[in-house]
Image (spheres, helix red, strand yellow):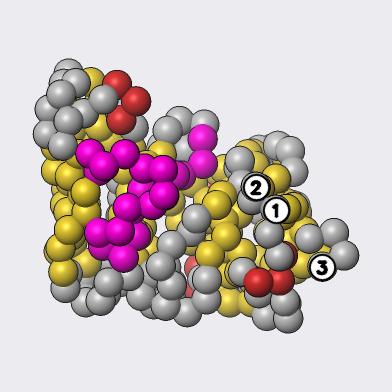
Amino acid sequence: IQLTQSPSFLSASVGDRVTITCRASQGISSYLAWYQKKLGKAPNLLIYAISTLQSGVPSRFRGSGSGTEFTLTISSLQPEDFATYYCQQLNSYPITFGQGTRLEIK
Amino acid sequence: QVQLVQSGAEVKKPGASVKVSCKASGYTFTSDYIHWVRQAPGQGLEWMGIINPSGGSTSYAQKFQGRVTMTRDTSTSTVYMELSSLRSDDTAVYFCARGGEGRQLFFDYWGQGTLVTVSS
């Protein structure tokens, strides 16, 4: 299952609201997760099952969608949010990731 | 607390093999599966395969079939990933991650990553 994220690159300011889209090549039910990755660090789970916030993740992160189209929204960007974001499907093997969306400070 | 601690960076020549370890602690080792994911420089995340620490069963991504072997040692709560016939494009950071099996919800804990450099 191929996951296509858009945009690949996003430039935004602190306080902005941003949305990242992840489109699957076929239905993946609710087996969609989002991760934040910073340089030199392991990925950090943000959201699973499309919209469930992982414990400890700030509420400014929100996931939504269904079927083959999903979104990650960050409601008010904070300095620590500038990173690369990946969606992941866990519906079937091989598990796949989107190509990533790099979020940079404007 | 749950921790996955990986072995240190490796430098290998083309054609060689590398074995990366991932030591689990803070939970029951045999109750969750371990996945391996890699990230080549400037690239995205790529799933390599899964091992069941309880029985040792494995499933590998087709791309790595025949070159990757995942094993575990329950006495030390450690999982290993060995990749053989290394090529320059195997240069990447390799991560282990705790997850489930089959349809599952997430990878909740990750190792810190192990840089494997393949260079002559």
Q: Is A37 placed above or below B49 here? A: above
Residue A51 forms part of the magenta stretch = yes
- Write down the chain letter for disc 1: B
Task: Specify the segment rendered in magenta.
Answer: A41-61
Give the residue at mark 3.
Answer: B74
Q: Position of residue A71 (x, y in %)?
A: 17, 54
Foreground of the two, A51 or B68: A51
Foreground of the two, B9 or B76: B76
Separation of marks 2 and 3 at Cα, in angstroms: 19 Å
Let me know if marks 2 and 1 both belong to one chain: yes
Let me know if marks 2 and 3 both belong to one chain: yes
Of marks 2 and 1, which one's residue comes earlier in the chain?
Answer: 2
Q: Residue at x 42, y 77 (%)?
A: B103
Give the residue at mark 1.
Answer: B26
In the rendered view, does A58 fall on the left or right side of B26? left
Label disc, if present, on residue B1 of the rendered structure: 2
Q: Are marks 2 and 1 in contact (CB under 8 Å)?
A: yes
